[in-house]
Amino acid sequence: MHFNPYGGTAAELAARLVNADPEMDLLEVLDAAGYKPLGSLDARQTAELRRWIARLAEVFDAPSVPQLNALLAETTSRPYISTHDGRPPHLHYAHEDAPTDERVKAYTAAGLAALFCEDPDRIGRCARPGCAVVFVDTSRNGRRRFCSTRCSNRVHVADHRMRRSA
Ligand SMILES: [Zn+2]
Ligand SMILES: [Zn+2]
């Protein structure tokens, strides 16, 4: 059985969208994440998704029940099981024929909401000042504070220097 911990790929996709370079084409970001069916995005849908991603970023900053319920309420969610693209049966929150922006909204809202209910502390943003990268903490103990070992090392080196000079 495939257990889908911590909101699974849907929460990961929300993090990837928030972390993506705003200059990057959103369809490319979705494609790189393996999102299927990819569909298409026109200018209006792209603007809509950018607005949505800004709200997802707020969730990573300070996740709360009202905030996530507001996101869920805005999606046209109608769960069903799909087997598209030869994939094993999996739960969909919007129909695979629905517009890409609607599907991404339903998917990411459901993913973050599931993650929040499992463990809200696993929705995080890097603790290094100046780093804005968000992440889904899939570590065993769930105490991850930084987006990468690079950020964690930089903060620890800085702490060490500060202690030595004190
Ligand atoms: Zn699917
Ligand atoms: Zn970082």
Image (cartoon, grey):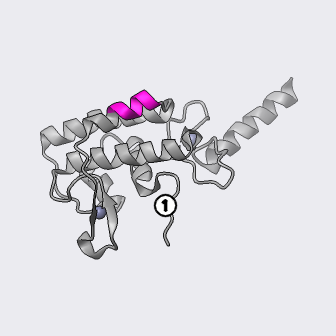
The residue lying at 29 percent from left, 52 percent from top is: 93
Magenta stretch: residue 67 in it?
yes
- Where does the image place residue 83, in percent across and percent down from the top left? 27, 71
The image shows residue 29 at horizontal and vertical percentages of 32, 53
Image mark count: 1
Residue located farthest toward the top when viewing the structure as drawn: 166
Q: Give whichever of 14, 3 is nearer the camera.
A: 3
Q: Is residue 11 above or below residue 18?
A: below
Label 1, on which residue? Answer: 4
Magenta residues, dominant SS class: helix
Q: 47 above or below 33?
A: above
User: Residue 164 is drawn in which quadrant?
Assistant: top right
Mark 1, Cα crowd under 10 Å, few <14 / some 14-19 / many 20+, is: few
- The residue segment tinted magenta is 65-70
Identify the residue shown where x is 69% and y is 51%: 141
In the visual, does 71 lie left or right of 38? Answer: right
Judge by depth and name the residue closer to the eye, 129 or 80.
Answer: 80
The residue drawn where x is 23% and y is 59% is 38
* Residue 25 seen anywhere in this rendered image of the structure: no
Tell me, yes or no, if residue 76 can be seen here. yes
Q: Which amino acid type is marked by label 1?
A: Asn
The stretch drawn in magenta includes residue 86? no
Q: Quadrant of ligand 2?
A: top right
Q: Horizontal placement of 146 versus 31: left or right?
A: right
Q: Secondary structure at mark 1?
A: loop
Task: Residue at 64%, 45% (x, y): give it.
Answer: 144
Residue 74 rendering spot, x and y as whole percentages: 26, 35
Query: Residue extending furthest bottom?
Result: 86
| Residue 145 location (% of width, % of height) | 64, 41
- Is 46 situated left or right of 24 in this image? left
